[in-house]
Amino acid sequence: MEQAELKVEHLPAEPLDAAATFHREHLDPAIAVLEVAAANLTIILPPAPSDHDDWRRSIARDLARKFAPKRVNVLGGGGKEAVQSMLAYLRGASGVTGQYLPLHD
């Protein structure tokens, strides 16, 4: 199955501002990918402290529910190697969906 990736480079430091920015600037493109092109989507977000976890979990969970049986997961942080390793894992993990996965190097 095709796994699309949506990489978000920058978000505000404050959790509410970051969530609002994601919804305003990145949610529609994510939905468009799921509606048209991809069987699965992994959203890659920049590193953030744990006070961002709730809104990131909600994005993963709510998009996965809306677009099931397509899979949607959200990665947060991590260097290039950590992101690539998790993307490789997710390509073969057909049961993993609706998860926020904070990465570490």
Image (tube, helix red, strand yellow):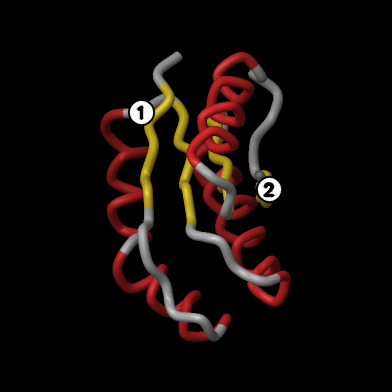
Q: What amino acid is labelled 1 in the image?
A: Ala
Residue at the image point whose x is 28% and y is 29% from the top: 37
Residue 44 x %, y %: 47, 48
Q: Which residue is mark 1?
A: 38
Q: What amino acid is labelled 2 in the image?
A: His
Nearest the camera: 4 or 79? 79
Residue 52 x %, y %: 64, 72
**Horizontal arrangement in the rendering, residue 36 relative to residue 61 (left or right):** left
Q: Are marks 1 and 2 in contact (CB under 8 Å)?
A: no
Q: Which residue is mark 2?
A: 104
Rendered image: mark on residue 12 = none
Crowd tier of the residue under label 1, counting other residues whose Cα lies within 10 Å: few below 14, some 14–19, many 20 or above: some
Residue at the image point whose x is 54% and y is 37% from the top: 83
Q: Secondary structure at mark 1?
A: loop
**Horizontal arrangement in the rendering, residue 92 relative to residue 19 (left or right):** right
Residue at the image point whose x is 31% and y is 40% from the top: 33
Q: Secondary structure at mark 2?
A: loop
Q: Earlier in the sequence, mark 1 or mark 2?
A: 1
Above or below, 32 relative to 96: below
Residue 10 x %, y %: 37, 67
Figure quadrant of residue 87 = top right
Crowd tier of the residue under label 2, counting other residues whose Cα lies within 10 Å: few below 14, some 14–19, many 20 or above: few
Residue at the image point whose x is 51% and y is 81% from the top: 13
Figure quadrant of residue 4 = top left
